[in-house]
Every structure is written in structure tokens, then in C-alpha cells.
């Protein structure tokens, strides 16, 4: 692949119906910011686009709950999110709004182009209608009893109690959230994108070859959708909030939010360039690298639907990379905005002022790049104290203090060592630093930001090891000249840390550069032997990081404990609270020893026709691949399972289910009502490994 002339980086447009939480940050905004900051350090031409997604049913639901207009809702949360992002150091080139006039016109023009080209299929379908309210109901305006778990407050698209995906017609006793009335089915006309037909085009087939160069979680989810065959999807909705459909006979209809929202990337780029044609270089020239940072729940829209829209329109380039992350959990549970189970960014910034880099560091260290991960306040405390404070901060502080003590804050001169021990320590340290910098670049460019940040910390580790081996505080009594060389080397490592830290810890990098009295230093100098010249006068040292005390995180734990208790009190279903089953009768060790448990990796997953509960899985056990049927369809979408490591009962006798031979069983944990989780290894391990 040729080197791009420019980069267009986007981060998923957040819904303007609530604040930003740490799951959002870890999913796409922080990874995108790190990547963009790195590109800018490399002096690349890069534009970073985001903005508030201000249409869709969640906005109108929020407005009704708060007794205000949808515009007031989006105005409130757009400002809240934009300010929080800026304070946290997320440096968008432009942050737009899909309620803007430019966006409305861009989205309407886009739709009209596809309409005029005959891309859409006009269809009349039955949809729930509220006769009292006098309007059609979007999925989230319909509630009823979940057929799976009995939750009386399931939505028309999903039961948030058990996670089952639903259609409005699946609900038992459906009710309109607008009036409380029982809705009726009524015919309505909408325009559909014929995704099944577009899937068969040569243009789309050529496009999906790039999946082979993308992360496995993206490739797996997309292949699962494609293998099942794509279905037509309506690109219009019967709502009164959104971009009006710009064709005759579409009164009272707006564009589907997932048609409208990704076009927001285009309209925001237009606004960034003040409507000049400069924006077209980033959207219409093949020497641009287009990168979408998203969360796993947005993969199909960015990797399949939006590219189909662009292909159908013509003249736009297609995404080159879509580095989607998985989900971040919180203290043993899924983050949920509806249950207030989250760490909100604006609240963190208020509770921990001036400590943005602590959260940036921790979220990158636990980033859910290949599988779901978890944030806990205790882990936050441990990582800050044992890594940022004890490794990076400690190294810089020791170097700055010793330089002030020995040389009044002036950078000493470099020295060539004659002592073999010192020569070896110097060579080892500088080689380790150089290797970590090179590896860090490789990891960033392949979107492995956890590993990249780990290499940043390895630079500080190499510096600490160098000081520990040479002990300049002792050597100064007998060999002051050698100490000058050691401190010169240590200061060069500090300078390289200041440069390398910029994408990950921008506030810390700025403070360290100020202490070293260097500003706007070029990234390429990080490979030079001398970054900080002799004679440079340093500024007074300051502590980069401070310990996180128990008293600081306890209020956060107390808040979550109260939220959990409140949720449990309110979380009732028609069948009552779930109860765990009693332990079965004892078995002997010999009985248990007969079970052969192995680690398996799921290669493929698909639904079993006419079987609502069953998924057909292809599982790699290392020594062979097996077909396993599992009754987990109510808890997992097939695409979620691709690449997941699981524990398999490998010596269970084969059994035919629905005419398919199942050759094993997955181990799962749950309460059989609303929770079911796969039991697998905590870390990546070779398929076929024995579970003991």
C-alpha cells in the first residue's frame, strides 16, 4: 500500500441524550485521539472529525421525560459533551452537530441522489400505530412483556433485562409509551436500501477484501452478517424529529438515524473548511487514508451499511481501516446509562481536577481492543500508584532533583565511559529505549495502543534500571566525571519520554517539556542520541503524579454501591427476582476427573433456522475443529462470539439437535433468567489447552 498523502480520522458521533462515560472513551474517542496526536507528531496532514448525533428516538424520549423540546435536549448535551472532551484533551479538528443546516442539506442531497438513481426500493409494511397519539411508533415507543424473561418493560427492539433482541410484534401486551394505549398495525410506506442486492455487486465484493487487513473482531462480525445474507433495511422513519425525507409523498417522515448520522462526518468536514471545496480532498481522493474509530455495536453500520451508501452514491472513497474496540465493563457489571451504572467523564473531571492523564493512562492500559475488559477503582488506584507514580514519575523526579543538586539545573556534558560496567549499563539502557520507541510506533500504526503505551512505560523502566545499576548518588563521591555522563544520558531519556508520552499523556508531556525547557520538539528527534543539549537550563522540578489515596476512591465506590442497591430495589419482573438454584448432590473426584475440559476458540457462529434459542458454532480445539450447538441465542448475537475463547466439554458424547450433530458443550455461568456469560480463560491461550 502506498503512503497516504493525508488522513481523515473520525470518531463515532455520540448521541446527544446524555453525558459521555468511560465506556465511550475507551471504545473510540481516546484511541482515536492517541492515533491522531501520533500522526500530528509525525507531521502528517490529518483532520479529526466528530460531532453530536442529534436525531433518533432516544432524543425524543429524553425530551418527553424532561418535558422539553428535542432541540433543548441536544443543545444541553452537545455543550456538556463538547466541553468534557476538550477538558479531557480530546483534540478534534472539528466537532459538528447533525441538527445544523449544513448537515440537513448534505443528508437530504445524499438521499436525493440515491433516490434519483433508483437505488431505494419503495415498500409498504405494517407498523404499530398509536390511534390516540395519532402517529406511528418507533421501536422504543413500544413496551410490553418480554417473551423470554417476562420483563413487563421490554422495548420493541430489545429487552434490557435479559438482552434479547426483539421485534415490536414479539412483545406480549404491547403498549404505546406516548398514550398507554394498545397500538394497532397500520400500513405505511418507507424507502429501503436493498442490501442483499448490493452485497452481490462486484464493487462491494472488491471492497470487503480489505477486511483481511482489519482486526479480527471486525472481520468476524462482518463475515457473520454476510454469511447469513443481508436483508433490505428501511432508510426512512415515521417520526417528527430528524432530517425530512426530500421526496414527494414523504410527509411526516425523516431519514433513518443510521442513514443520517454517518453523513455527519461529511457535513462536519464541510463546515470545518467553511464550505470550500478543500473538504473533497479528504472524502474523494484515493490518496487519503480514511479511518473510522468506533465501538463494537457500530461495526455493521460503518463497515457495511455506510460503505454501501457511499458506493451507491458514487464519488466517495471507502474506509481504509475501522479499528473497533469491544465493550468496557464497570466493577463486575455492564455499563448502562439507563441504570446510571457508569463513570461519567464530566463528573470525573470535577472530582479529580488536573488528573486527566491518570484516566487516559488507565483506560488505555485496559482498553478492550480484542475482548471486553473491566474498569475498577481499585485497579485505577493500583495502576496510578505502581506505574505512573513509582515508575515514570519516580524516574523523572530523581533525574531532575539530582541535576539540580549536582549542576544547578544545567544539563551536563556527555561522556565516553572507560569502565566496562558503566559502558555495559549505558549500552543496555540506550538500546532498550531505542527498541521501545521503534516498537511503540509499530504498535500505534497497527492500532495496538495498549501495547504501545506499555512500551512508553518500558522507556521509563529502562531509565530507572540505568540509575539503579550505576548509582550516581554513590559514584559522585569517587568519579564526578562519570556521573556527568550518566546524568546526561538520563536527561536524554527524560526528553525522549516527553516526546513519546505526548499521544498518551499530553498534559504530562507538556509539563515535562516545560521542566526540561524544550518546546514543540519534533518527533524525529526522538531517535537522535542528543535531544536535550548540554548547557540547557532546566526549569524547577515538579511532581508529575501523586498517589491515589483510599479516601479519594472510596466516595466513588460508595456512589456505585448506592446505585447498585437502588437498581436491585427497582429491578423486578413479572415473575419476581431471579433466584439461584441449590447445589446438586455430591460427586466423587473420580467422576469429575472423567470430564475433559479444553480451551476452544469460536471461528464461526450462526443462528439455527427455526430455533430461537440455538446458535451453531464452529470451534477450534487446536487438534480439530468441531460443530457445537449452544442454547445461547437469547444472550449473544452470533457476531459477538467470533474470536472468543471459551471452555468446552470435549468428551461429551455427540448428540443430534435439529438434525445437526453437536460435538461438545460450552461452559456458561448465569441464573437462567437474565444473565448468562461464557466461561473462558482470562488471557489468550492456545486452543486445545487443558482446563484443570
Image (cartoon, rainbow, N blue to C red):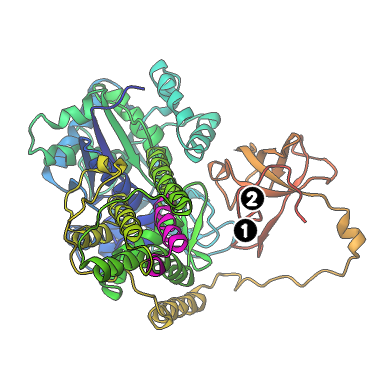
Quadrant location, the N terminus: top left
- Quarter-wise, where is residue 48 in the image? top left
Identify the mark nearer the N-term, 2 or 1. 2
Looking at the picture, tell me which residue is in the foreground, 589 or 428.
428
Q: Is 581 on the left-hand or right-hand side of 14?
A: right
Question: Is-magenta flag for residue 461?
Answer: yes
Report the residue at 29% width, 57% height from top.
491
Neighbour class for label 2 at 10 Å: few (<14), some, many (≥20)? some
Q: CA distance from mark 2 to mark 1?
A: 8 Å
Report the residue at 67% width, 60% height from top.
669
Task: Decide: is 325 above or below 377.
Answer: above
Report helix, strand or loop for mark 2.
loop
Report the residue at 20% width, 35% height from top.
45
Q: Position of residue 501 (x, y in %)?
A: 31, 53
Q: Is 628 on the left-hand or right-hand side of 398?
A: right
Discs 2, 1 touching: Cβ within 8 Å:
yes
Residue range in magenta is: 455-475
- Quarter-wise, where is residue 23 in the image? bottom left
Q: Position of residue 235 (x, y in %)?
A: 32, 36
Quadrant location, the C terminus: bottom right
Q: Which mark is residue 632?
A: 2
Q: Position of residue 30 (x, y in %)?
A: 33, 53
Q: Is 668 on the left-hand or right-hand side of 386?
A: right
Task: Decide: is 28 above or below 553.
Answer: above
Task: Decide: is 478 above or below 425.
Answer: below
Q: Which residue, as the protein is rendered here, is positioned at the far top?
A: 202
Question: Is-magenta flag for residue 374?
Answer: no
Q: Which residue is mark 1?
A: 676
Numbered disc total:
2
Amino acid at each position: 500500500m502506498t503512503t497516504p498523502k493525508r488522513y481523515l480520522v473520525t470518531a463515532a458521533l455520540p448521541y446527544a441524550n446524555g453525558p459521555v462515560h468511560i465506556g465511550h472513551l475507551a471504545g473510540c474517542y481516546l484511541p482515536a485521539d492517541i492515533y491522531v496526536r501520533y500522526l500530528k507528531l509525525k507531521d502528517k496532514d490529518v483532520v479529526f472529525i466528530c460531532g453530536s448525533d442529534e436525531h433518533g428516538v432516544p432524543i425524543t424520549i429524553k425530551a418527553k421525560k424532561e418535558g422539553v423540546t428535542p432541540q433543548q435536549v441536544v443543545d444541553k448535551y452537545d455543550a456538556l459533551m463538547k466541553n468534557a472532551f476538550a477538558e479531557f484533551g480530546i483534540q478534534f479538528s472539528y466537532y459538528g452537530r447533525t441538527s445544523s443546516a449544513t448537515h440537513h442539506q448534505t443528508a437530504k442531497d445524499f438521499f436525493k441522489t440515491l433516490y434519483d438513481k433508483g437505488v431505494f426500493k419503495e415498500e409498504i409494511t405494517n407498523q404499530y400505530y398509536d390511534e390516540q397519539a395519532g402517529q406511528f411508533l418507533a421501536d422504543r415507543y413500544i413496551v410490553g412483556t418480554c417473551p423470554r424473561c417476562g420483563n413487563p418493560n421490554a422495548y420493541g427492539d430489545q429487552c434490557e433485562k435479559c438482552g434479547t433482541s426483539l421485534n415490536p410484534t414479539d412483545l406480549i401486551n404491547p403498549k404505546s409509551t406516548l398514550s398507554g394505549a394498545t397500538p394497532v398495525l397500520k400500513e405505511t410506506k418507507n424507502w429501503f436500501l436493498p442490501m442483499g442486492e448490493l452485497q452481490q455487486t462486484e464493487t462491494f465484493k472488491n471492497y470487503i477484501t480489505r477486511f483481511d487487513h482489519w482486526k479480527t473482531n471486525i472481520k468476524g462480525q462482518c463475515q457473520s452478517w454476510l454469511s447469513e445474507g443481508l436483508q433490505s433495511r428501511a432508510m426512512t422513519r415515521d417520526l417528527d424529529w430528524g432530517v425530512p425525507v426530500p421526496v414527494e409523498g414523504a410527509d411526516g417522515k425523516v431519514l433513518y438515524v443510521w442513514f443520517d448520522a454517518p453523513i455527519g462526518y461529511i457535513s462536519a468536514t464541510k463546515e470545518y473548511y467553511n464550505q470550500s471545496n478543500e473538504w473533497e480532498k479528504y472524502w474523494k481522493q484515493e490518496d487519503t487514508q480514511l479511518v473510522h474509530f468506533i465501538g463494537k455495536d457500530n461495526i455493521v453500520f460503518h463497515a457495511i451499511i455506510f460503505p454501501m451508501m457511499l458506493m451507491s452514491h458514487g464519488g466517495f472513497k471507502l474506509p481504509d481501516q475501522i479499528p473497533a474496540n469491544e465493550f468496557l465493563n464497570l466493577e463486575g457489571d455492564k455499563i448502562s446509562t439507563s441504570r446510571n451504572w457508569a463513570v461519567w467523564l464530566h463528573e470525573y473531571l470535577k472530582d479529580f481536577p488536573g488528573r486527566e492523564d491518570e484516566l487516559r493512562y488507565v483506560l488505555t492500559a485496559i482498553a478492550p481492543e480484542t475482548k471486553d475488559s473491566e474498569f475498577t477503582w481499585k485497579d485505577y488506584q493500583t495502576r496510578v500508584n505502581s506505574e505512573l507514580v513509582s515508575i515514570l514519575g519516580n524516574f523523572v523526579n530523581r533525574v531532575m532533583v539530582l541535576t539540580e543538586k549536582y549542576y544547578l539545573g544545567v544539563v551536563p556534558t556527555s561522556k565516553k565511559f572507560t569502565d566496562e560496567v558503566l559502558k555495559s549499563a549505558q549500552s543496555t539502557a540506550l538500546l532498550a529505549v531505542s527498541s521501545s520507541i521503534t516498537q511503540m510506533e509499530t504498535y500505534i500504526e497497527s492500532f495496538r495502543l495498549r501495547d504501545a503505551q506499555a512500551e512508553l512505560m518500558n522507556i521509563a523502566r529502562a531509565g530507572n534500571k540505568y540509575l539503579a545499576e550505576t548509582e550516581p548518588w554513590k559514584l559522585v563521591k569517587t568519579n564526578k566525571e562519570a556521573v556527568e555522563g550518566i546524568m546526561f544520558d538520563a536527561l536524554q531519556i527524560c526528553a525522549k519520554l516527553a516526546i513519546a508520552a505526548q499521544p498518551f499523556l499530553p498534559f504530562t508531556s507538556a509539563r515535562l517539556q516545560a521542566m526540561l525547557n524544550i518546546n514543540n520538539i519534533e518527533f524525529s528527534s526522538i531517535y537522535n542520541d542528543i535531544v536535550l543539549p548540554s548547557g540547557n537550563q532546566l526549569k524547577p522540578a515538579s511532581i508529575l503524579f501523586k498517589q491515589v489515596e483510599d479516601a479519594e476512591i472510596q466516595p466513588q465506590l460508595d456512589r456505585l454501591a448506592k446505585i447498585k442497591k437502588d437498581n436491585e430495589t427497582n429491578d423486578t419482573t413479572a415473575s419476581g427476582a431471579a433466584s439461584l438454584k441449590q447445589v446438586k448432590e455430591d460427586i466423587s473426584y473420580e467422576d469429575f476427573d472423567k470430564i475433559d475440559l479444553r480451551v476452544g476458540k469460536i471461528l464461526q457462529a450462526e443462528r439455527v433456522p427455526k430455533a430461537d434459542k440455538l446458535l451453531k458454532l464452529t470451534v477450534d480445539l487446536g487438534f480439530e475443529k468441531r460443530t457445537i450447538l449452544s442454547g445461547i441465542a437469547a444472550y449473544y448475537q452470533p457476531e459477538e462470539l467470533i474470536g472468543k475463547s471459551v471452555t468446552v466439554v470435549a468428551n461429551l458424547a455427540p448428540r443430534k439437535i435439529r438434525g445437526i450433530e453437536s460435538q461438545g458443550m460450552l461452559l456458561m455461568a448465569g441464573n437462567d433468567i437474565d444473565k448468562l456469560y461464557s466461561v473462558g480463560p482470562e488471557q489468550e491461550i492456545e486452543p486445545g489447552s487443558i482446563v484443570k
